[in-house]
Image (cartoon, grey):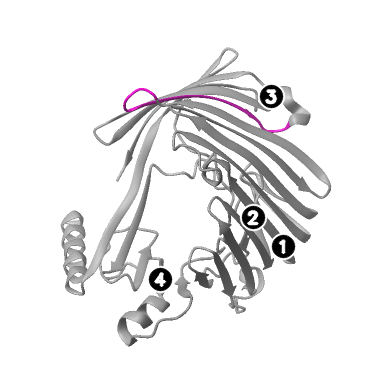
């Protein structure tokens, strides 16, 4: 019965969306597998998880776009049966300058895009090339709990853009141990791309938020700064498309008492600085990157590195080898070396990973087969 309600309400939603000339888009992925590990004489088998036990197998993005590109609404927290009593977190984006032009015949000299909704820590503009795809090097305003940061992006062609994010919420709920208080926060960032292949950003936040090189969150009740730059050498020099070479860097600083949150708890320090630089290049079917990282909390610095070489010269197949070092001061106990073999067939990617690591203090060898479906 519940499945019938789900299908019926979903169909009604799609029909209603088409009635108002909107485009409905679903995208996401499914990924799952198993991880088999051997540490000395101990053997364990677990379900594959990207990072922590809280990771889920699926990720779904549900987005409705106005057919004229004037607005879009993205929905999150897609659970339950989508019946009339369910409420979904959502974020709206409005292309204000395009709406003025289309509806009123007024053309602004700059582009203006507005956003509001279920967004807490709002990501600022960046030029950093995230070669590992871990998305750690982001700079945000800290709005945990209030989940209502509004933003505006003003851009001039492809040359320059400015983003302002503001969380004005300052209310309190509950009493005693149940009391919850929210504080305002804001962030502003600017990005310039003076020539093709070169871009840079700078940002400021009151109550800043970012991540360290291990993916742990860092937040402050004080202010923060950040900057990033990218030089696409191949594009800037006009090299043939078979050549790829770029250099990018990122740095952020949070002042005051900084709270570091990990899976095992929280700790504090006086100020935090994060720095990353990488080189990403390749020729033909071979590509490689090297990323060097420095994270400092309360004058205690950690130096790390990520490297990878990938070969994609076989149809529908990708092969790579990698070496990661989480802390050079404890090199022998923080290295991971491994490789992946991936094959794509019928929209599904089958991946086999083998890795040797010393992160737990003991030598561990693991084999992880998994399948990923993107849609």
Q: Position of residue 65 (x, y in %)?
A: 30, 67
Q: Position of residue 279 (x, y in %)?
A: 61, 37
**Residue at the (75%, 66%) spot, across then down:** 222
Q: Quadrant of residue 125?
A: bottom right
Q: Specify which label sits upstream in the sequence, 1 or 3.
A: 1
Q: Residue at label 3? A: 361
**Residue at the (21%, 59%) spot, across then down:** 6
**Residue at the (31%, 58%) spot, across then down:** 80
Q: Secondary structure at mark 1?
A: strand
Q: Quadrant of residue 14?
A: bottom left
Which residue is at the front of the view, 357 or 245? 245
- Crowding near pointer 2: few (<14 within 10 Å), some, many (20+)? many
Query: Disc 4 and disc 2: Cα gap in Å?
Result: 24 Å
Q: Secondary structure at mark 2?
A: strand
Q: Which residues are magenta?
A: 313-327
Instruction: Check whether the beta carbons of the residues at disc 3 and disc 4 lie within 8 A of each other.
Output: no
Q: Which mark is residue 165?
A: none
Left or right, 365 with reference to 14:
right
Taking the magenta stretch, the answer to whether it contains residue 269 is no
**Residue at the (64%, 72%) spot, across then down:** 185
Q: Residue at label 4? A: 92
Q: Specify which label sits upstream in the sequence, 3 or 4.
A: 4
Query: Disc 1 and disc 4: Cα gap in Å?
Result: 27 Å
Instruction: Check whether the beta carbons of the residues at disc 1 and disc 2 lie within 8 A of each other.
Output: yes
Instruction: Check whether the beta carbons of the residues at disc 1 and disc 3 lie within 8 A of each other.
Output: no
Which mark lies nearer to you, 3 or 4?
Answer: 4
Q: Specify which label sits upstream in the sequence, 4 or 2.
A: 4
Q: Residue at label 2? A: 210
Q: Please, which residue is most extreme toward the right here?
A: 299
Left or right, 272 with reference to 159:
right
Height in image: 99 above or below 24?
below
Which residue is at the front of the view, 290 or 354? 290
């Amino acid at each position: 019965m519940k499945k019938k309600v789900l299908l019926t309400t979903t169909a009604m939603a799609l029909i209603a969306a088409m009635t108002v000339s909107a485009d409905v888009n679903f995208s996401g992925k499914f990924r799952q597998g198993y991880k088999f590990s051997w540490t000395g004489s101990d053997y364990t088998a677990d379900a594959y998880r990207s990072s922590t036990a809280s990771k889920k197998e699926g990720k779904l993005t549900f987005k409705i776009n106005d057919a004229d590109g004037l607005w879009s609404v993205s929905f999150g927290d897609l659970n339950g049966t989508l019946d009339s009593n369910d409420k979904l977190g959502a974020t709206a984006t409005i292309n204000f300058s395009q709406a003025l032009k289309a509806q009123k015949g007024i053309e602004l000299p700059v582009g203006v895009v507005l956003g509001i909704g279920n967004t807490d820590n709002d990501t600022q503009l960046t030029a950093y090339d995230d070669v590992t795809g871990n998305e750690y090097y982001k700079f945000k305003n800290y709005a945990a709990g209030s989940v209502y940061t509004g933003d505006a992006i003003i851009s001039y062609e492809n040359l320059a853009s400015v983003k302002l994010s503001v969380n004005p919420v300052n209310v309190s709920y509950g009493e005693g141990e149940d009391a919850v208080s929210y504080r305002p926060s804001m962030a502003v960032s600017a990005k310039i791309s003076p020539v093709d292949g070169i871009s840079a950003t700078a940002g400021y936040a009151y109550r800043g938020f970012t991540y360290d090189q291990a993916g742990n969150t860092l937040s402050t009740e004080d202010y923060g700064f950040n900057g990033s730059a990218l030089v696409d050498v191949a594009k800037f020099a006009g090299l043939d498309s078979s050549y790829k070479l770029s250099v990018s860097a990122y740095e952020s600083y949070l002042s005051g008492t900084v709270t570091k949150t990990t899976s095992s708890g929280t700790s504090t320090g006086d100020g935090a600085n994060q720095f990353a630089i990488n080189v990403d290049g390749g020729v033909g079917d071979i590509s490689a990157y090297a990323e060097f990282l420095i994270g400092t909390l309360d004058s205690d610095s950690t130096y790390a590195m990520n490297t990878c070489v990938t070969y994609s010269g076989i149809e529908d197949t990708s092969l790579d080898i990698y070496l990661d070092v989480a802390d050079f001061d404890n090199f022998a106990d923080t290295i991971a070396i491994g490789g992946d073999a991936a094959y794509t067939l019928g929209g599904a990617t089958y991946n086999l990973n083998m890795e040797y690591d010393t992160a737990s203090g003991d030598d561990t060898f693991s084999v992880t087969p998994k399948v990923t479906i993107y849609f």
